[in-house]
């Protein structure tokens, strides 16, 4: 009996892994099955829809009040460092004597 159980153990473990993976691919909620336009219409909010006035944006500090782990993680990402205000740019500060002009 024990030999039979040991022989089928890899098959059973494989089946469990396949079933677990199959379950992981199923969306948890109906919201995850919506297209982006449908989701925007449903929620009436989308961060990049461009409808909010600039002064209505509270910034990442306001988001961090509830989503601190996510904000801290995003701050470490290279994309967070891809754009910076000119007055905060270390590269521009290091090359303050360099000019810029368009045309001849």
Image (spheres, rainbow, N blue to C red):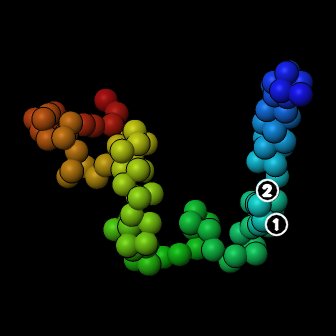
Residue 88: in sight, yes or no?
Answer: yes
> Which circle marks residue 30 in the picture?
1
Which numbered circle lies on residue 70? Answer: none
Which quadrant holds residue 68?
bottom left
> Which residue is under mark 2?
27
Check contact, mark 1 vs mark 2: CB within 8 A.
yes
For the point 28% across and 52% down, the residue is 85
Q: Quick one: SS at disc 2?
A: loop
Q: Is residue 66 above or below residue 36?
A: below
Residue 88 position within the rendered picture, expressed as x and y whole percent measured from the top left: 21, 50
Q: Residue 38 at x, y = what percent?
A: 80, 67
| 3D distance between C-alphas at marks 1 and 2 | 7 Å
Asked which quadrant contains residue 82, the reply is top left
Q: Quadrant of the N terminus?
A: top right
- Residue closest to the far left: 97
Front residue of this view, candidates 50 and 4: 4
């Amino acid at each position: 009996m024990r030999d039979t159980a040991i022989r089928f153990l890899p098959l059973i473990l494989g089946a469990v892994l396949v079933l677990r993976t199959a379950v992981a691919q199923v969306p948890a909620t109906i919201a995850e099955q919506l297209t982006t336009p449908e989701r925007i219409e449903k929620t009436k909010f989308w961060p990049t829809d461009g409808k909010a006035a600039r002064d209505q944006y509270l910034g990442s500090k306001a988001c961090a009040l509830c989503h601190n782990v996510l904000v801290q993680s995003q701050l470490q990402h290279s994309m967070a460092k891809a754009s910076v205000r000119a007055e905060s740019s270390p590269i521009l500060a290091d090359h303050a004597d360099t000019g810029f002009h368009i045309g001849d």
